[in-house]
């Protein structure tokens, strides 16, 4: 141990004598390690770490059939008690929205209807009070609720007497009556669900279908699938002939599935970046070891064994790696608090356990230790092998200014540099594809003008507004109360609408699905949607008048290619449900320009219905104003409360914010890959410059002799550039193969450009090839302009 510490102290003194070299190596490795650690923290939070529940590895989602395969009937009749030896608890939940009506205003709160034992199944205990019991689910029982710690704090002021307190609310699922809820418990502040929940209620519908289970310890997935499938067969009144059985999938895996491809792509990019950093540093160490051949030879001549020399090299590698790893971990740890919310926002999915889960924990540190060990091994092997092959006497006889170094050393340096170029090509192609995707989406013509438009969501209780006529009357009063023209729609702008089948006079509509949206007359004017044929809606298009519709230009061409859409009849679903029956026949009174419902929407076949003919309890109100959203929302709340203070008002994403949110993911991925690509390309070019410059320095005598014998500067430059050009060519060829893999990996993230886009591939090869040739040409040009007599005299 003492000898190892002595080796470390000696290695530290040697590195301190070359501060420039040591600083470059440590900082380069530190950046690479920081990228790897940040990526590991995110991947660990989403893909590797268990859900934030005790024994979460035993929590599974149930798929009762494959995708697009019909379900067996009567799944709610499964006898879970008979499966007690396999399933510890079956979990059923149904998301809902509550509207809390007390306190002078109505507040929207996310809620969930859950089966008895739901919290126990997750292994969660309330911070105050009790959990929900089976007796709470009976129709004769008083309505009780668990509330979130945040709701207790924000709405009830963390009152200590919260247990037993009552409040009134109505449900988005069933707004026939306002009911009273009694608080029986408060959820712990760290409680997390994939959908933030403020109020938890008991399911009161009798038998329910469970879609999650906690298996008993020691039960295998295959056994549980078989037993649950048998229970389905015993309970179902009808099983489809194509039914393939039950599938269980880990809850964490199910939740992370949407972001898995993105995180795999980011991990791949970070791994390439770290590998290129290591290759660059290894090249620097090889060049340094070549210059230290005489020093090593002297040590061997004075009696030092090769083992001692190896220990010196290992000690230096450990110090460099440890310093770089410490810097990388420290930088990442300090930046993760800022980075975590940005990651969640751009991935569009909360990390299991919340933002705090994106952190450097024990698992990440173990992985960092493994990465550090691999880096240290890489920094040790190449210099150690190079030193072990040095001949003692030839190293002592050779002048440092002469010789060319070992053939193996030159080949290894060239191979590593070509690998850097190849990795840079792969990342640059991915960067190019993602940047072109982001630019394409940014420049996409949405067909609407989203500037200076704010939005709010209103929800009307059904017991107060039981008929379409009552709903329409409320919106008429609201328009009068606001005193400024507003736009009403039953579906948020720039959110893909529910798809419905359609029927049309004289047109083939087999398999055709369209988006149907109810809009008020000002919708087209507010968003600058052009009228192509016929007319827009008017205030006369309301309940009791002739049913009419306006369709998009693309739908008109699809239904009636020869024109004449105005005056034709269509009918489609008019409710916010995919199973809604077709509504009444409507006369097409206008054709308008196409509107993209999302930035990636390619299906522009849409139907617009007059809002006052199909008024809805869930409505988005849009208003053209330059006032800040918070200021406008306060005035809007007062306008609504003046009519009915039980109507809920909540902020809604403005159209411009909705568009920005849809662009956030592609922009984030493009920016991330751009950073990786630029960093690694710079390292590759610098590494190539160093290798070529060193090779030219080793051939200084040859160059001087050629020039003394009459070789021109151009001929010498061409000769010297050839080495670098060969490395670049090999790296580009290998990089193109890697780029194909990257393009396939990113296929799902690419829009508006082909994954194997020739322009992107060609531009990458040209740019990196030109940069590589420039890095080779510059030292060659300097060498060709040197005085050959001075070089020969120095020899």
Image: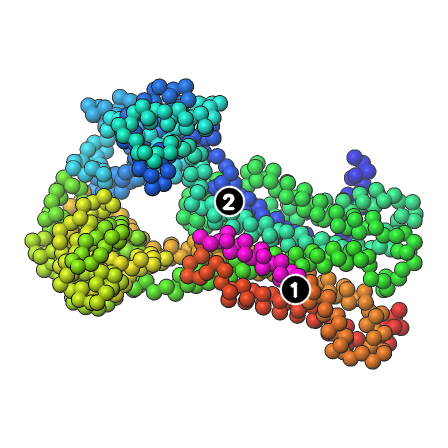
Q: Where residue 240 sits in the image (x, y, percent)? A: 30, 34
The label on residue 769 is none
Q: Which mark is residue 729?
A: 1
Q: Position of residue 782 (x, y in %)?
A: 74, 73
Is disc 2 surrounded by few (<14), some (14 to 19) or many (20+) residues within 10 Å?
Answer: many
Decide: is 584 above or below 91: below
Residue at position x 57%, y 36% in the image: 362
In the rendered image, is residue 736 in sight?
yes
- Residue 637 visible in the displayed image: no
Q: At which x and y percent is residue 53?
A: 44, 31
Relative to 485, say whether 54 is above or below. above
State how far apart marks 2 and 1 are (Cα). 36 Å
Q: In the rendered image, which residue does mark 2 sit on?
A: 42
Image: magenta residue range: 729-748
Q: Residue 587's quadrant in the figure?
A: bottom left
Q: Percent position (x, y) of residue 661?
A: 38, 54
In reply to whether residue 741 is colored magenta, the answer given is: yes
Q: Residue at x 46, y 63 (%)?
A: 436
């Amino acid at each position: 141990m003492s000898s190892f510490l002595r080796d470390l102290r000696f290695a530290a003194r040697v590195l301190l004598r070359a501060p420039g070299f040591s600083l470059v190596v440590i900082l380069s490795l530190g950046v690479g390690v920081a990228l790897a650690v940040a990526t590991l923290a995110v991947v660990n939070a989403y893909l590797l770490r268990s859900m934030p529940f005790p024994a979460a590895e035993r929590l599974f989602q149930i798929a009762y059939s494959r995708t697009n395969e019909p379900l067996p009937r009567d799944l709610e009749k499964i006898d879970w008690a008979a499966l007690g030896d396999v399933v510890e608890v079956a979990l059923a939940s149904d998301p809902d929205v509550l509207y809390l009506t007390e306190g002078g205003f109505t507040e929207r709160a996310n809620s969930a209807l859950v089966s008895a034992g739901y919290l126990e199944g997750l292994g969660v205990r309330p911070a105050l009070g009790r959990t929900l019991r089976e007796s709470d689910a009976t129709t004769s029982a008083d309505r009780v609720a668990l509330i979130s710690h945040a709701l207790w704090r924000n709405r009830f002021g963390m009152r200590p007497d919260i247990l037993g307190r009552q409040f009134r609310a109505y449900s988005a699922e069933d707004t026939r009556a306002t009911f009273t809820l009694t608080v029986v418990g408060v959820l712990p502040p760290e409680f997390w669900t994939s959908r933030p929940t403020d109020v938890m209620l008991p399911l009161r519908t009798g038998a329910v279908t469970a879609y999650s289970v906690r298996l008993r310890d020691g039960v295998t997935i295959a056994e549980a699938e078989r037993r649950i499938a048998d229970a389905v067969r015993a309970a179902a009144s009808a099983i489809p002939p194509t039914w393939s059985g039950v599938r269980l999938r880990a809850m964490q895996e199910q939740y992370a599935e949407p972001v898995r491809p993105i995180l795999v792509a980011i991990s791949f990019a970070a791994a390439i970046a770290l590998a290129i950093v290591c290759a660059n540093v290894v090249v620097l160490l090889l060049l340094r070891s070549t210059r230290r051949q005489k020093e090593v030879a002297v040590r061997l001549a004075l009696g030092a064994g090769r083992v001692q020399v190896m220990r010196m090299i290992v000690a230096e590698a450990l110090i460099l790696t440890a310093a770089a790893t410490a810097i990388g971990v420290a930088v990442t740890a300090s930046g993760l608090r800022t980075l975590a919310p940005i990651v969640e926002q751009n991935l569009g999915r909360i990390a299991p356990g919340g933002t705090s889960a994106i952190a450097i924990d024990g698992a990440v540190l173990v992985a960092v230790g493994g990465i550090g060990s691999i880096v240290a091994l890489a920094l040790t092997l190449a210099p150690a092998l190079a030193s072990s092959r040095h001949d003692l006497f030839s190293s002592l006889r050779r002048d440092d200014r002469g010789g060319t170094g070992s053939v193996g050393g030159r080949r290894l340096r060239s191979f590593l540099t070509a690998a850097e170029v190849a990795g840079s090509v792969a990342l640059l192609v991915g960067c190019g594809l993602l940047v072109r995707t982001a630019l394409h989406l940014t420049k996409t013509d949405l067909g609407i003008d989203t500037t200076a438009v704010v939005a709010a969501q209103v929800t009307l209780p059904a017991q107060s507004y039981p008929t379409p006529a009552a709903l329409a009357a409320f919106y008429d009063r609201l328009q009068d109360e606001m005193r400024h023209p507003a736009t009403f729609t039953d579906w948020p702008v720039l959110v893909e609408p529910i798809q419905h089948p359609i029927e049309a006079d004289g047109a083939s509509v087999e398999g055709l699905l369209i988006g149907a949206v109810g809009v008020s007359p000002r919708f087209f004017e507010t968003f600058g949607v052009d009228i192509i044929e016929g007319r827009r809606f008017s205030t006369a298009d309301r309940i009791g008048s002739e049913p009419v519709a306006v369709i998009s230009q693309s739908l008109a061409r699809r239904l009636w290619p020869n024109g004449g859409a105005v005056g034709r009849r269509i009918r489609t679903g008019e409710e916010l449900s995919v199973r809604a029956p077709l509504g009444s026949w409507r006369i097409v009174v206008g054709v308008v320009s196409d509107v993209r419902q999302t930035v990636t929407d390619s299906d522009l076949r849409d139907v617009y219905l007059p809002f006052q003919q199909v008024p809805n309890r869930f409505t988005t109100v849009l208003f053209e104003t330059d006032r800040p959203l918070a200021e406008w929302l306060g005035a809007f709340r007062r306008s609504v409360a003046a009519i009915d203070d039980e109507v809920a008002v909540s902020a809604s994403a403005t159209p411009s914010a909705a568009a920005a949110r849809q662009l956030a993911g592609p922009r984030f991925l493009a920016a991330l890959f751009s950073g990786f690509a630029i960093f690694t390309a710079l390292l590759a070019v610098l590494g190539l410059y160093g290798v070529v410059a060193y090779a030219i320095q080793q051939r200084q005598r040859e160059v001087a002799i050629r020039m003394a014998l009459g070789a021109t500067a151009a001929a010498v430059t061409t000769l010297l550039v050839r080495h670098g050009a060969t490395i670049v060519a090999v790296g580009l060829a290998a990089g193109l193969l890697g780029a194909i893999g990257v393009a396939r990996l990113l296929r799902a993230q690419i829009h508006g450009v082909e994954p194997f886009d020739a322009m992107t591939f060609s531009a990458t090869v040209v740019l990196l090839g030109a940069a590589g040739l420039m890095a080779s040409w510059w030292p060659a040009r300097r060498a060709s302009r040197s005085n050959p007599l001075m070089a020969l005299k120095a020899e």
